[in-house]
Image (cartoon, coloured by chain):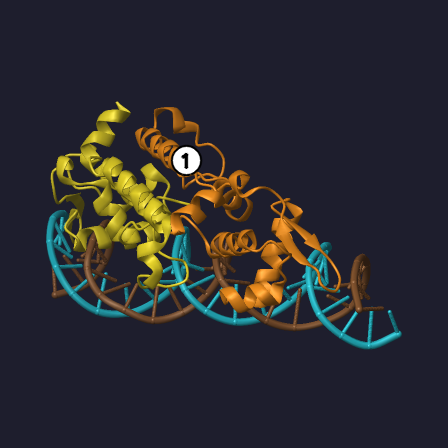
Chain colours: A orange, B yellow, C brown, D cyan
Amino acid sequence: MKLITRDTDYALRAVCFIVKNKKTVSVPELVRELNIPRPFLRKILQVLSRKGIVRSFKGKGGGFTLGLPPEKIYLLDLLRIFQGPLKLNECTLNKKRCPKISNCPLSKKLSGIEKQVLRELKPITIASLIKGMA
Amino acid sequence: MKLITRDTDYALRAVCFIVKNKKTVSVPELVRELNIPRPFLRKILQVLSRKGIVRSFKGKGGGFTLGLPPEKIYLLDLLRIFQGPLKLNECTLNKKRCPKISNCPLSKKLSGIEKQVLRELKPITIASLIKGMA
DNA sequence: GACAAATGATACTATTGTGGTATCATTATG
DNA sequence: CATAATGATACCACAATAGTATCATTTGTC
């Protein structure tokens, strides 16, 4: 079970690398640096760009810069963008809320765990991760 | 992202139902009660039987009974049987341990979260779930 | 002993999510 | 206007999850 999928992980790496460069960073540079398959990385960056996480510049000499300061880019943002909302307590039988959810003891436990996990993830930003790597 | 997959969930329901019946419970009964696809349920029960969670009786009038007291059947047992060990901090790039794992700040966070989740799940037994449903 | 009703073993199939490609259009710089 | 970049979008491959099918074996009942 993966808490973080590959695209989120790639996005994280790409954003971290962009932070460390003051100028715009192009896809070829990122590919060289991070060994991420080029077309996949492009797709990821386009999503990040649409979401405002990075800003893009087209044309020769173009590339990407951050769209937000690194203290305002949360891991949970990336997670939600690429993986949807983090939900651990969904009933496996229904996409929708299980009618029995109110008296399902397992669901209660799971939503407690979900809350804890969210509490842990919430404060993690790009800035904090980079600091941690130092 | 599912913490609990369908087979684990089915297994859970089946075991709970078996607990509440003193006599052996057959697949047809379980199907009627729980609305689980018959062949799938059969497969699940066979696994549970091999693992000793339930005991099986072949032949006419056969079926399943518990193989352990409900206080000794842990949710984590079922989880591990059907989903393997719970790991949240695996690096998405490698199946094996990432060489950079020691200075990867994200991995540290994730393994902390993993520990918490395990701490929460550990005490949950079939007995405790049934109690909670009362 | 034959039959019926159950599980055991095992191989196959379907659906879905993840991970990745490919292609053409658009834009900016020299 | 050529070139080097991103934008949009459609497609493909693989693996995991979910489910099916079939035949063999065991056991109780008549």
Q: From the viewer's perspective, tell me whether residue D1 is left or right of residue A2.
A: right
Residue A105: name its quadrant: top left
Q: Is residue A36 visible?
A: no
Residue A89's spot in the image, x, y percent?
Answer: 39, 36
Q: From the viewer's perspective, tell me whether residue B114 is left or right of residue B126.
A: right
Local packing at callout 1 (Cα closer than 10 Å; few below 14, some 14-19, many 20+) is some
Q: Is residue A9 visible?
A: yes
Q: From the viewer's perspective, tell me whether residue B74 is left or right of residue B3.
A: left
Q: Regarding mark 1 in the picture, which secondary structure is present there?
A: helix
Q: Quarter holding the N terminus of chain B?
A: top left
Up-down relation of residue A34 to residue B30 (above or below): below
Up-down relation of residue A114 to residue B106 (above or below): above
Residue nearer the viewer, B99 or A21: A21
Q: Amino acid at mark 1?
A: Leu
Tally of marks: 1
Which residue is labeled 1 in the image?
A118
Residue B48's spot in the image, x, y percent?
Answer: 21, 50
> What residue is shown at x 46% (from left), y 40% (from top)?
A86
Residue B18's spot in the image, x, y percent?
Answer: 21, 38
